[in-house]
Amino acid sequence: MSSVPRNPAAAAARPKYYDLNLLNLPMPGLVSIFHSVTGVVLFLLQSTLVSESKFDFWRNIINLPLVKIVLLGFVWAYMHHFFAGIRYLLLDVHVATAKEPAQLSAKIVLVLGVLATILIGVRIW
Amino acid sequence: MVKRLDRTPVGAHYGWQDWLAQRITAVIMALFSLVIFAALICQGSVNYEDWKALFHSQLFRIGALLFLLSVFYHAWIGIRDVLMDYIKPAGIRLGLQVLVLVYLVTCTIWSVSILWGN
């Protein structure tokens, strides 16, 4: 076979290349990563949910502008996760599985998530 | 001859049950999201009495618990997938999975106590 002797150590030391730029991902890949990340964010969010007995206390805190901005981040996470999830459910039943429809639906998901966040942002301000 | 089981103890469950559960819980959460959206956002400002009245309804409590159980099970499958994708050492992955599980079971008990405790 090959005249060059194989060196296991050299093979193991091969450099790895990670493309860390999310913007280089195809749209479906980007939505997929955001689906994971927003899943983690929601996981953290639910740890902050408390009972309604301190309703006014929490309501005053929620009314602080900085808190509202952070909450809007969570709202975006929820909305993005919601729409991306519906996209995955549609993909499961073979809706828009070809390359172009998949890219289009991924863009729609990104836009709808931001749009819904803006609407709720307007609503709470 | 005994067939060697070459499965990772902290891997997926090599079946479609979790895949299906992830979708069923997703549909439950999506439907309840629309319900709570209709109940809260469209109503205008919500004071303590409205909030209390909403959770006084037994049907709403059951729906809320179903939603929360879906969140916790969905979160378990999702977080486990993220851990399997990004945490390679089996020991650390198992430790994190146990932490997540204990936390989610605690949340489940807490949810019941919140919904029916007062």
Image: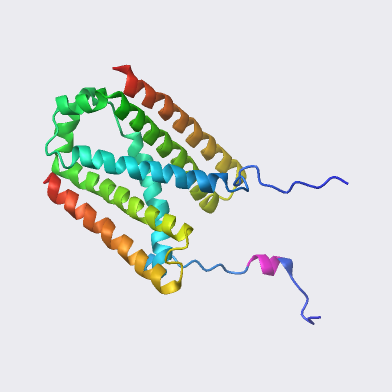
Q: Give the residue drawn at x 73%, y 49%.
A: B6
Q: Is residue A17 rendered to the left or right of residue A5?
A: left
- Across and down, in percent, residue B46 comes to 14, 33
Q: Is residue A57 rendered to the left or right of residue A23?
A: left
- Across and down, in percent, residue A17 comes to 52, 69
Q: Give the residue drawn at x 19%, y 38%.
A: B40
Q: Is residue B28 above or below residue A115?
A: above
Instruction: Tell me where residue B61 sits by quadrant.
Output: top left
Foreground of the two, A2 or A100: A100
Residue A10 is inside the magenta segment: yes
Instruction: Tell me where residue A1 sits by quadrant.
Output: bottom right
- Across and down, in percent, residue B62 comes to 36, 28
Magenta-drawn segment: A9-13
Residue A81 is inside the magenta segment: no
Foreground of the two, A36 or A101: A101
- Across and down, in percent, residue A109 comes to 32, 60
Q: Is residue A113 above or below residue B28?
A: below
Q: Is residue A10 rendered to the left or right of residue B30?
A: right
Q: Identify the main secondary structure in magenta.
A: helix
Foreground of the two, A5 or A72: A72
Q: Is residue A44 above or below residue B58?
A: below
Foreground of the two, A59 or B95: A59
